[in-house]
Amino acid sequence: MRKVLGLAVILTGLLVGGAYAQRFVVVTHGQAADPFWSVVKNGVDLAAKQMGVKVEYRAPETFDMVQMGQLIDAAVASKPDGLVVSIPDADALGPHIQAAVKAGIPVISINSGADVFQKFGVLMHVGQEEYIAGKGGGEKMRAMGVKKAVCINHEVGNVALDQRCQGFKDGLGPGASVEVLAVPTDFTEVRNAILAYLQKNPDVQGILTLGPVGAEPTLQALEESGKIGKIVFGTFDLSPAVLKALSEKKMAFAIDQQQFLQGYLPIVFLTNYVRYGLLPANKVVLTGPGFVTPENAAQVIALSKKGIR
Protein backbone atom coordinates (compact mmCIF):
# COMPACT_ATOMS: atom_id res chain seq x y z
CA MET A 1 0.00 0.00 0.00
CA ARG A 2 2.84 2.35 0.90
CA LYS A 3 4.53 1.57 -2.43
CA VAL A 4 1.34 2.42 -4.30
CA LEU A 5 0.97 5.70 -2.42
CA GLY A 6 4.63 6.50 -2.97
CA LEU A 7 4.27 5.87 -6.71
CA ALA A 8 1.21 8.12 -6.82
CA VAL A 9 3.15 10.92 -5.17
CA ILE A 10 6.03 10.51 -7.63
CA LEU A 11 3.67 10.52 -10.62
CA THR A 12 1.90 13.62 -9.32
CA GLY A 13 5.23 15.34 -8.90
CA LEU A 14 6.21 14.44 -12.46
CA LEU A 15 2.96 15.85 -13.81
CA VAL A 16 3.35 19.12 -11.93
CA GLY A 17 7.08 19.50 -12.49
CA GLY A 18 7.27 17.97 -15.97
CA ALA A 19 4.31 17.81 -18.33
CA TYR A 20 2.57 20.60 -16.42
CA ALA A 21 5.56 22.96 -16.30
CA GLN A 22 4.01 25.54 -18.62
CA ARG A 23 5.71 28.82 -19.47
CA PHE A 24 3.72 31.94 -20.30
CA VAL A 25 4.83 35.43 -21.36
CA VAL A 26 3.01 38.65 -20.46
CA VAL A 27 3.70 41.68 -22.67
CA THR A 28 2.02 44.96 -21.71
CA HIS A 29 2.53 48.65 -22.44
CA GLY A 30 3.07 49.36 -18.73
CA GLN A 31 6.28 48.95 -16.76
CA ALA A 32 6.20 46.72 -13.67
CA ALA A 33 7.58 49.63 -11.59
CA ASP A 34 4.55 51.81 -12.43
CA PRO A 35 2.11 52.05 -9.46
CA PHE A 36 -0.71 50.64 -11.59
CA TRP A 37 1.19 47.92 -13.43
CA SER A 38 3.05 46.77 -10.33
CA VAL A 39 -0.31 45.54 -9.03
CA VAL A 40 -0.95 43.77 -12.35
CA LYS A 41 2.41 42.03 -11.96
CA ASN A 42 1.54 41.07 -8.37
CA GLY A 43 -1.51 39.29 -9.79
CA VAL A 44 0.62 37.58 -12.43
CA ASP A 45 3.15 36.42 -9.83
CA LEU A 46 0.55 35.04 -7.43
CA ALA A 47 -1.26 33.14 -10.19
CA ALA A 48 2.05 31.70 -11.42
CA LYS A 49 2.85 30.46 -7.92
CA GLN A 50 -0.59 28.98 -7.33
CA MET A 51 -0.81 27.31 -10.74
CA GLY A 52 2.75 26.00 -10.73
CA VAL A 53 3.79 27.70 -13.99
CA LYS A 54 6.59 30.01 -15.09
CA VAL A 55 5.62 33.51 -16.24
CA GLU A 56 7.83 36.25 -17.70
CA TYR A 57 6.61 39.86 -17.57
CA ARG A 58 7.91 42.20 -20.27
CA ALA A 59 7.15 45.83 -21.17
CA PRO A 60 8.79 48.65 -23.17
CA GLU A 61 10.72 51.27 -21.21
CA THR A 62 8.23 53.94 -22.28
CA PHE A 63 4.91 53.98 -24.15
CA ASP A 64 6.47 52.69 -27.37
CA MET A 65 4.40 50.58 -29.76
CA VAL A 66 7.37 49.70 -31.97
CA GLN A 67 9.27 48.30 -29.00
CA MET A 68 6.16 46.55 -27.70
CA GLY A 69 5.67 44.87 -31.07
CA GLN A 70 9.28 43.70 -30.93
CA LEU A 71 8.71 42.28 -27.44
CA ILE A 72 5.69 40.34 -28.70
CA ASP A 73 7.74 38.99 -31.62
CA ALA A 74 10.52 37.93 -29.26
CA ALA A 75 7.99 36.22 -27.02
CA VAL A 76 6.52 34.33 -29.99
CA ALA A 77 10.00 33.26 -31.12
CA SER A 78 10.63 31.76 -27.66
CA LYS A 79 7.62 29.45 -28.22
CA PRO A 80 5.76 29.91 -24.90
CA ASP A 81 2.71 27.84 -23.98
CA GLY A 82 0.61 30.99 -23.88
CA LEU A 83 0.78 34.75 -24.29
CA VAL A 84 -0.94 37.63 -22.47
CA VAL A 85 -0.95 41.06 -24.13
CA SER A 86 -2.47 44.49 -23.72
CA ILE A 87 -3.66 46.16 -26.95
CA PRO A 88 -3.43 49.96 -26.58
CA ASP A 89 -2.94 50.41 -30.35
CA ALA A 90 -4.67 47.82 -32.53
CA ASP A 91 -3.13 49.03 -35.79
CA ALA A 92 0.41 48.85 -34.45
CA LEU A 93 0.12 45.59 -32.51
CA GLY A 94 -2.44 43.63 -34.51
CA PRO A 95 -0.01 41.98 -36.95
CA HIS A 96 2.29 40.90 -34.10
CA ILE A 97 -0.60 39.36 -32.17
CA GLN A 98 -1.92 37.62 -35.27
CA ALA A 99 1.54 36.13 -35.81
CA ALA A 100 1.37 34.62 -32.32
CA VAL A 101 -2.06 33.12 -33.01
CA LYS A 102 -0.85 31.79 -36.39
CA ALA A 103 2.05 30.12 -34.59
CA GLY A 104 -0.46 28.20 -32.49
CA ILE A 105 0.09 30.16 -29.28
CA PRO A 106 -3.09 30.80 -27.25
CA VAL A 107 -3.43 34.51 -26.51
CA ILE A 108 -5.48 36.40 -23.92
CA SER A 109 -5.65 40.21 -23.91
CA ILE A 110 -5.86 42.39 -20.82
CA ASN A 111 -6.51 46.00 -19.86
CA SER A 112 -6.96 47.54 -23.32
CA GLY A 113 -8.33 45.98 -26.48
CA ALA A 114 -11.84 44.88 -25.49
CA ASP A 115 -13.21 46.22 -28.78
CA VAL A 116 -10.65 44.60 -31.10
CA PHE A 117 -9.30 41.40 -29.54
CA GLN A 118 -11.62 39.00 -31.37
CA LYS A 119 -10.60 40.09 -34.86
CA PHE A 120 -7.01 39.11 -34.05
CA GLY A 121 -7.94 35.59 -32.94
CA VAL A 122 -7.39 36.32 -29.25
CA LEU A 123 -9.26 33.84 -27.02
CA MET A 124 -10.74 36.34 -24.57
CA HIS A 125 -10.24 39.71 -22.90
CA VAL A 126 -9.88 40.50 -19.20
CA GLY A 127 -10.40 44.12 -18.22
CA GLN A 128 -12.98 46.87 -18.34
CA GLU A 129 -14.80 48.54 -21.22
CA GLU A 130 -13.12 51.92 -21.24
CA TYR A 131 -15.92 53.96 -22.79
CA ILE A 132 -18.44 52.68 -20.24
CA ALA A 133 -16.03 53.43 -17.39
CA GLY A 134 -15.41 56.96 -18.66
CA LYS A 135 -19.13 57.54 -19.06
CA GLY A 136 -19.63 56.49 -15.45
CA GLY A 137 -17.10 59.11 -14.38
CA GLY A 138 -18.89 61.75 -16.43
CA GLU A 139 -22.25 60.85 -14.95
CA LYS A 140 -20.78 61.08 -11.47
CA MET A 141 -19.44 64.58 -12.14
CA ARG A 142 -22.69 65.65 -13.79
CA ALA A 143 -24.49 64.72 -10.55
CA MET A 144 -22.04 67.03 -8.75
CA GLY A 145 -23.00 69.93 -11.02
CA VAL A 146 -19.98 69.93 -13.33
CA LYS A 147 -20.63 71.43 -16.77
CA LYS A 148 -17.11 72.39 -17.86
CA ALA A 149 -14.30 69.88 -17.46
CA VAL A 150 -10.93 68.78 -18.78
CA CYS A 151 -9.72 65.25 -19.45
CA ILE A 152 -5.97 64.81 -18.93
CA ASN A 153 -4.42 62.32 -21.38
CA HIS A 154 -0.90 61.19 -20.44
CA GLU A 155 -0.54 58.58 -23.22
CA VAL A 156 -1.54 60.12 -26.52
CA GLY A 157 -2.02 57.30 -29.03
CA ASN A 158 -3.45 54.88 -26.50
CA VAL A 159 -6.92 54.20 -27.92
CA ALA A 160 -8.22 53.06 -24.53
CA LEU A 161 -7.52 56.50 -23.08
CA ASP A 162 -9.28 58.17 -26.00
CA GLN A 163 -12.31 56.00 -25.22
CA ARG A 164 -12.21 57.06 -21.57
CA CYS A 165 -12.26 60.73 -22.50
CA GLN A 166 -15.09 60.22 -25.00
CA GLY A 167 -17.14 58.32 -22.45
CA PHE A 168 -16.47 61.06 -19.90
CA LYS A 169 -17.70 63.71 -22.32
CA ASP A 170 -20.85 61.75 -23.14
CA GLY A 171 -21.47 61.04 -19.46
CA LEU A 172 -21.45 64.77 -18.64
CA GLY A 173 -24.30 65.09 -21.11
CA PRO A 174 -25.55 67.68 -23.62
CA GLY A 175 -24.58 71.24 -22.90
CA ALA A 176 -21.42 70.29 -21.04
CA SER A 177 -17.98 70.96 -22.49
CA VAL A 178 -14.91 68.75 -22.16
CA GLU A 179 -11.45 69.64 -23.42
CA VAL A 180 -8.76 66.98 -23.78
CA LEU A 181 -5.36 68.13 -22.54
CA ALA A 182 -2.40 66.05 -23.73
CA VAL A 183 0.50 65.87 -21.26
CA PRO A 184 3.79 63.95 -21.04
CA THR A 185 4.55 61.39 -18.33
CA ASP A 186 7.13 63.46 -16.42
CA PHE A 187 5.73 64.52 -13.04
CA THR A 188 7.06 68.10 -13.12
CA GLU A 189 5.98 68.68 -16.72
CA VAL A 190 2.46 67.43 -16.00
CA ARG A 191 2.15 69.63 -12.89
CA ASN A 192 3.32 72.69 -14.81
CA ALA A 193 0.93 71.95 -17.68
CA ILE A 194 -1.99 71.71 -15.24
CA LEU A 195 -0.97 74.95 -13.47
CA ALA A 196 -0.84 76.73 -16.83
CA TYR A 197 -4.20 75.30 -17.85
CA LEU A 198 -5.85 76.42 -14.61
CA GLN A 199 -4.51 79.95 -15.09
CA LYS A 200 -5.95 80.13 -18.62
CA ASN A 201 -9.22 78.42 -17.67
CA PRO A 202 -10.26 79.68 -14.22
CA ASP A 203 -13.86 78.61 -14.83
CA VAL A 204 -13.12 74.88 -15.21
CA GLN A 205 -15.27 72.90 -12.76
CA GLY A 206 -14.00 69.34 -13.10
CA ILE A 207 -10.82 67.43 -13.90
CA LEU A 208 -10.56 63.76 -14.85
CA THR A 209 -7.12 62.17 -15.11
CA LEU A 210 -6.63 58.81 -16.75
CA GLY A 211 -4.19 57.24 -14.30
CA PRO A 212 -1.86 57.97 -11.37
CA VAL A 213 0.78 59.35 -13.77
CA GLY A 214 -1.60 62.23 -14.41
CA ALA A 215 -3.43 62.24 -11.08
CA GLU A 216 -0.51 62.75 -8.70
CA PRO A 217 0.97 65.87 -10.35
CA THR A 218 -2.54 67.23 -10.92
CA LEU A 219 -3.18 66.89 -7.21
CA GLN A 220 -0.04 68.90 -6.48
CA ALA A 221 -1.06 71.54 -9.03
CA LEU A 222 -4.48 71.90 -7.39
CA GLU A 223 -2.85 72.29 -3.97
CA GLU A 224 -0.39 74.92 -5.23
CA SER A 225 -3.15 76.90 -6.92
CA GLY A 226 -5.51 76.70 -3.95
CA LYS A 227 -8.13 74.81 -5.94
CA ILE A 228 -8.50 71.72 -3.75
CA GLY A 229 -12.21 71.32 -3.00
CA LYS A 230 -13.13 74.02 -5.52
CA ILE A 231 -12.71 71.77 -8.57
CA VAL A 232 -14.24 68.30 -8.69
CA PHE A 233 -11.30 65.97 -9.23
CA GLY A 234 -11.53 62.32 -10.23
CA THR A 235 -9.16 59.82 -11.77
CA PHE A 236 -8.88 56.40 -13.27
CA ASP A 237 -6.90 53.82 -11.31
CA LEU A 238 -5.36 53.77 -7.88
CA SER A 239 -2.04 54.50 -6.23
CA PRO A 240 -1.04 55.14 -2.59
CA ALA A 241 -1.08 58.91 -3.25
CA VAL A 242 -4.52 58.74 -4.87
CA LEU A 243 -5.94 56.69 -1.99
CA LYS A 244 -4.46 59.09 0.56
CA ALA A 245 -6.02 62.03 -1.26
CA LEU A 246 -9.38 60.27 -1.29
CA SER A 247 -9.20 59.55 2.44
CA GLU A 248 -8.42 63.24 3.04
CA LYS A 249 -11.36 64.26 0.79
CA LYS A 250 -9.08 66.05 -1.66
CA MET A 251 -10.54 63.99 -4.51
CA ALA A 252 -14.10 63.02 -5.35
CA PHE A 253 -13.53 59.52 -6.74
CA ALA A 254 -11.20 57.06 -8.43
CA ILE A 255 -12.38 54.57 -11.03
CA ASP A 256 -11.02 51.18 -10.02
CA GLN A 257 -10.61 48.51 -12.68
CA GLN A 258 -9.18 45.97 -10.20
CA GLN A 259 -5.99 45.50 -12.17
CA PHE A 260 -4.78 42.76 -9.84
CA LEU A 261 -7.36 40.52 -11.53
CA GLN A 262 -6.09 41.58 -14.95
CA GLY A 263 -2.77 40.00 -14.07
CA TYR A 264 -4.11 37.08 -12.07
CA LEU A 265 -7.02 35.74 -14.11
CA PRO A 266 -5.32 35.32 -17.53
CA ILE A 267 -2.64 33.07 -16.03
CA VAL A 268 -5.30 30.92 -14.37
CA PHE A 269 -7.35 30.81 -17.59
CA LEU A 270 -4.35 29.98 -19.81
CA THR A 271 -3.16 27.25 -17.46
CA ASN A 272 -6.54 25.54 -17.46
CA TYR A 273 -6.90 26.02 -21.21
CA VAL A 274 -3.51 24.46 -21.99
CA ARG A 275 -3.94 21.62 -19.50
CA TYR A 276 -7.60 20.78 -19.87
CA GLY A 277 -9.02 22.76 -22.79
CA LEU A 278 -11.24 24.74 -20.41
CA LEU A 279 -12.14 28.39 -20.92
CA PRO A 280 -14.93 30.65 -19.57
CA ALA A 281 -17.90 31.01 -21.90
CA ASN A 282 -17.80 34.81 -21.65
CA LYS A 283 -15.40 36.30 -24.20
CA VAL A 284 -14.96 39.41 -22.02
CA VAL A 285 -14.41 39.11 -18.27
CA LEU A 286 -15.04 42.55 -16.76
CA THR A 287 -12.87 43.59 -13.80
CA GLY A 288 -14.31 47.11 -13.60
CA PRO A 289 -15.37 49.79 -13.30
CA GLY A 290 -15.84 50.25 -9.60
CA PHE A 291 -15.68 53.54 -7.72
CA VAL A 292 -13.48 54.34 -4.74
CA THR A 293 -14.65 57.40 -2.82
CA PRO A 294 -13.73 59.07 0.48
CA GLU A 295 -16.37 56.83 2.09
CA ASN A 296 -14.71 53.50 1.24
CA ALA A 297 -11.08 54.61 0.80
CA ALA A 298 -9.92 53.20 4.14
CA GLN A 299 -10.92 49.66 3.21
CA VAL A 300 -9.16 49.90 -0.14
CA ILE A 301 -6.03 51.36 1.49
CA ALA A 302 -5.78 48.26 3.67
CA LEU A 303 -5.90 46.05 0.57
CA SER A 304 -3.42 48.21 -1.33
CA LYS A 305 -0.82 47.62 1.38
CA LYS A 306 -1.00 43.95 0.41
CA GLY A 307 -0.44 44.82 -3.26
CA ILE A 308 -3.96 43.81 -4.28
CA ARG A 309 -5.55 47.22 -5.07
Image (tube, rainbow, N blue to C red):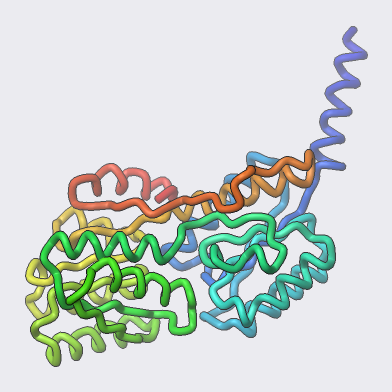
**Nearer the observer, 237 or 55:** 237
Q: Is residue 193 left or right of residue 278?
A: left
- Most distant residue in the top direction: 1
**Nearer the observer, 143 or 272:** 143
In which quadrant of the rendered image does the N terminus lie?
Answer: top right
- Most distant residue in the front direction: 174
Q: Would you place residue 54 above or below residue 174 in this image?
A: above
Residue 246, horizontal then vertical, whole percent = 21, 57
Determine which quarter of the picture holds residue 170: bottom left
**Nearer the observer, 188 or 169:** 169
Residue 28, horizontal then vertical, whole percent = 58, 68
Q: Is residue 126 left or right of residue 39?
A: right
Residue 11, horizontal then vertical, whole percent = 88, 28
Residue 203, horizontal then vertical, whole percent = 9, 82
Q: Image point 37% across, 48% down: which residue?
A: 305
Mark yes or no: residue 304 visible: yes
Mark yes or no: residue 56 visible: no
Q: Is residue 257 left or right of residue 173?
A: right
Q: Is residue 95 left or right of residue 192?
A: right
Q: Image point 22% across, 52% down: which residue?
A: 293
Q: Image point 15% across, 73% down: which residue?
A: 147
